[in-house]
Amino acid sequence: MPSRLKRAIGAVKDQTSISLAKIVNTNSSNLDVAVLKATTRDLEPVNERYVNDILVMISSNKLHAVICANAIAKRIGKTKNWVVALKSLMIVLRIFQNGDPFFPQEVLHARNRGAKILNLTTFNDYSQSSPYDYTAFVRSFAFYLDQRLDCLVTGKIQRRVANKTTGIGRKGSRRVNPQH
């Protein structure tokens, strides 16, 4: 468990990043703020509201897919915290599943330009006293997403289309077995 000082410094870093993103008054600042708020250092799960905001913004404009890929790559590339890296990768997975079909292409372009969006072979977690398990898991999850990206791009797997009328995938919803 990290010390109180480290947690406080992490919270200050998160708030500073969010505040700086809010100051920049561009079309992409809302997307940057949503990515930063979704990937905070706290041990709470990713806030679904921010993920939905990201998905809506990406689906509204192709340029936002580019901006989101760059924001996530920047966030992953700078962090030494397994929580931030894992939350960022979880957002990538959600966008692969439910987001704009242009996003995987942008992740591929960012990866080819050298961004550390899914290539986390050099990632090391310095936030815990015994970081090896966290580091290994983040690296493995990034490798899985990298393989999934290759399958998405080559057409071996298809994106999941969310059925909004049945409520599948919503919090608290249950799947009904149609055979009974």
Image (tube, rainbow, N blue to C red):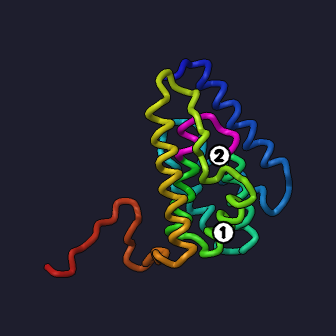
Mark 2 and mark 1: Cα distance apart in space: 19 Å
**Looking at the image, is mark 2 or mark 1 nearer the viewer?**
2
Q: Position of residue 46 (x, y in %)?
A: 52, 49
Location of mark 2 (residue) = 76
Secondary element at image label 1: helix
Residue 166 lies in what quarter of the image? bottom left
Q: Looking at the image, is mark 2 or mark 1 earlier in the sequence?
A: 1
Q: State the image coordinates of residue 21 (x, y, percent, origin top left).
A: 78, 48
For the magenta stretch, what is the residue range? 76-86
Q: Magenta stretch containing residue 81, yes or no?
A: yes
Viewer-side residue, 8 vs 141:
141
Q: Describe the element under mark 2 as helix, strand or loop.
A: helix
**Callout 2: 10 Å neighbours few (<14), some, many (20+)?**
many
Tell me the residue at 64%/30% (across/down): 10
Residue 7 position (above or below residue 147): above
The residue lying at 52 percent from left, 22 percent from top is: 2
Residue holding disc 1: 58
Where does the image place residue 147, in percent across and percent down from the top left? Answer: 50, 61
Which amino acid does the dot numbered 1 rest on? Ile
Q: Quadrant of residue 32?
A: bottom right
Most foreground residue, 166 or 145: 145
Which quarter of the rendering shows the C terminus? bottom left
Name the chief secondary structure element in magenta: helix
